[in-house]
C-alpha cells in the first residue's frame, strides 16, 4: 500500500491544500478533492503519480466546505463513488445553496478562488456513518464522525494513519504554528475537543492534514491542537464580553495569532500563505458566532 500526498497548489501556491491518493492491491482511493479551481492541478498530480483519473473509483470527502469537496461532483460524473457524512450528501447532490452562500461571501472572487462545483449524480453518492468501512484493494478505510469544525465532518482512518480533514487544524510544513480551523457557521468547541480527544486516544502514528501534509508526531500534534481550540475560544469569548464589534474581534484575533505565529518562527511569507487558506477574519467570525449562540 502507498499513500501519495498530492499538492493542489491552491491559488498557485504550494503547501496549502492536499488531496491524498491511496494505492492498494491495484485499486485507488482519493481522499479529499480540493475545490474546482484546483482540479487541473489534481489531475496533473495524479498523472505524475502514474495514474489516470479513470482509475479512481473511490472518492472520500471529509466535509462539504469548498476547499475540501468542491470538485467531488466532477469525480462522481467520471464514474467514481463519492463517500461522505449523511448530512453532507444532499449538498453534494444539489450544491446550489452551498454555492450561493459562498458567493455572497466571496462575491467577485468566488470563481477564481473556488471554481465550479458540479452536482453529483445521486446514485454515485454513498453515505457513511461512524464506524462504516470501505474496502479499497487490500485496505480498509473507516469513517469516524468528528464534529466540531462542522457537524457533517468525517475523518478517515487507515490502519495507524488518520486523514483528518479540518478536525486537527492547519499546520504548514516545516512550522510549529497550529492554526485553528474555525470557519462559520458550525464551530463548536465542546464537540471539537471531544473529537480531538477521540483521535488522541486511538494512538495513531501518523496524521494526514488537508492543510497540510503528513504529521509523524500525532500525539504531540493533537495535544497541542486541543489547547489551541480552547485558547482561541476563550480569547474570542473575552473579546465579546468586552463589547468589541465584529471588526474589532477580527483585528484582535489577527493580532494575537500573528504574534503567536511570529514567536514560533513563522515569517511574513508563510503568514500570507496561512491567511490564504485559513484566514483569521473568517475564523474570528466562526468563533464569535459560536459565542453569540451561547456555546
Image (cartoon, rainbow, N blue to C red):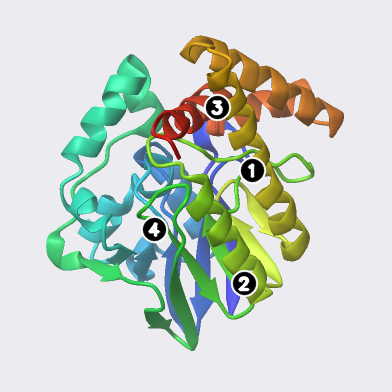
Closer-to-camera residue (231/87): 231
Q: Which residue is drawn at 51% across and 81% down?
A: 24
Secondary element at tag 2:
strand
Q: Where is residue 203 in the image (x, y as percent from the top left)?
A: 69, 74
Q: Residue at x 38, y 43 (%)?
A: 65
Q: Quadrant of the N terminus?
A: bottom right
**In the displayed structure, would residue 230 be above or below residue 22?**
above
Task: State which tag comes first along the sequence, 2 or 1.
Answer: 2
* Spatial CA span between label 3 and label 2: 27 Å
Task: State which tag comes first along the sequence, 3 or 2.
Answer: 2
Q: Position of residue 241 (x, y in %)?
A: 55, 20
Q: In which quarter of the image is the C terminus?
A: top left
Q: Nearer the viewer, mark 1 or mark 4?
A: 1
Asked whether the viewer can see residue 166, the reply is no
Residue assigned mark 1: 230
Secondary element at tag 4:
loop
Residue assigned mark 3: 279
Residue 61 tag number: 4
Sort mark 4 into few (<14), some (14-19) or many (20+) by Cα contacts within 10 Å.
many
Sort mark 3 into few (<14), some (14-19) or many (20+) by Cα contacts within 10 Å.
some
| Left or right for 42, reference 203 | left
Closer-to-camera residue (146/236): 236
Task: State which tag comes first along the sequence, 1 or 4.
Answer: 4
Q: Where is residue 219 in the image (x, y as percent from the top left)?
A: 74, 64
Q: Which residue is drawn at 72% across and 63% down?
A: 218
Secondary element at tag 3:
loop
Residue assigned mark 2: 161
Amino acid at each position: 500500500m502507498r499513500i501519495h500526498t498530492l499538492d493542489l497548489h491552491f491559488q498557485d501556491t504550494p503547501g496549502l491544500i492536499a488531496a491524498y491518493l491511496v494505492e492498494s492491491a491495484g485499486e485507488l482511493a482519493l481522499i479529499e478533492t480540493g475545490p474546482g479551481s484546483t482540479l487541473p492541478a489534481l489531475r496533473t498530480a495524479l498523472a505524475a503519480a502514474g495514474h489516470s483519473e479513470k482509475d479512481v473509483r473511490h472518492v472520500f470527502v471529509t466535509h462539504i466546505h469548498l476547499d475540501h469537496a468542491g470538485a467531488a461532483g466532477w469525480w462522481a460524473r467520471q464514474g467514481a463513488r463519492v463517500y461522505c457524512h449523511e448530512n453532507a450528501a444532499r449538498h453534494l447532490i444539489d450544491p446550489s445553496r452551498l454555492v450561493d452562500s459562498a458567493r455572497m461571501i466571496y462575491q467577485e472572487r468566488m470563481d477564481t478562488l473556488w471554481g465550479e462545483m458540479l452536482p453529483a449524480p445521486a446514485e454515485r453518492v454513498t453515505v457513511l456513518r461512524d464506524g462504516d468501512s470501505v474496502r479499497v484493494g487490500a485496505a480498509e478505510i473507516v469513517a469516524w464522525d468528528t464534529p466540531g469544525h462542522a457537524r457533517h465532518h468525517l475523518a478517515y482512518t487507515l490502519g495507524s494513519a488518520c486523514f483528518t480533514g479540518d478536525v486537527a487544524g492547519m499546520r504548514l510544513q516545516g512550522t510549529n504554528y497550529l492554526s485553528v480551523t474555525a470557519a462559520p457557521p458550525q464551530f463548536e468547541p465542546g464537540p471539537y475537543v471531544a473529537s480531538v480527544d477521540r483521535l488522541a486516544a486511538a494512538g495513531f502514528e501518523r496524521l494526514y492534514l488537508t492543510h497540510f501534509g503528513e504529521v509523524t508526531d500525532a500525539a504531540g500534534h493533537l495535544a497541542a491542537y486541543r489547547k489551541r481550540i480552547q485558547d482561541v475560544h476563550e480569547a474570542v469569548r473575552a473579546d465579546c464580553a468586552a463589547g468589541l464589534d465584529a471588526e474589532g474581534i477580527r483585528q484582535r484575533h489577527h493580532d494575537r495569532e500573528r504574534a503567536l505565529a511570529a514567536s514560533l518562527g513563522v515569517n511574513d511569507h508563510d503568514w500570507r500563505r496561512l491567511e490564504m487558506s485559513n484566514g483569521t477574519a473568517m475564523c474570528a467570525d466562526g468563533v464569535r458566532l459560536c459565542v453569540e449562540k451561547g456555546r
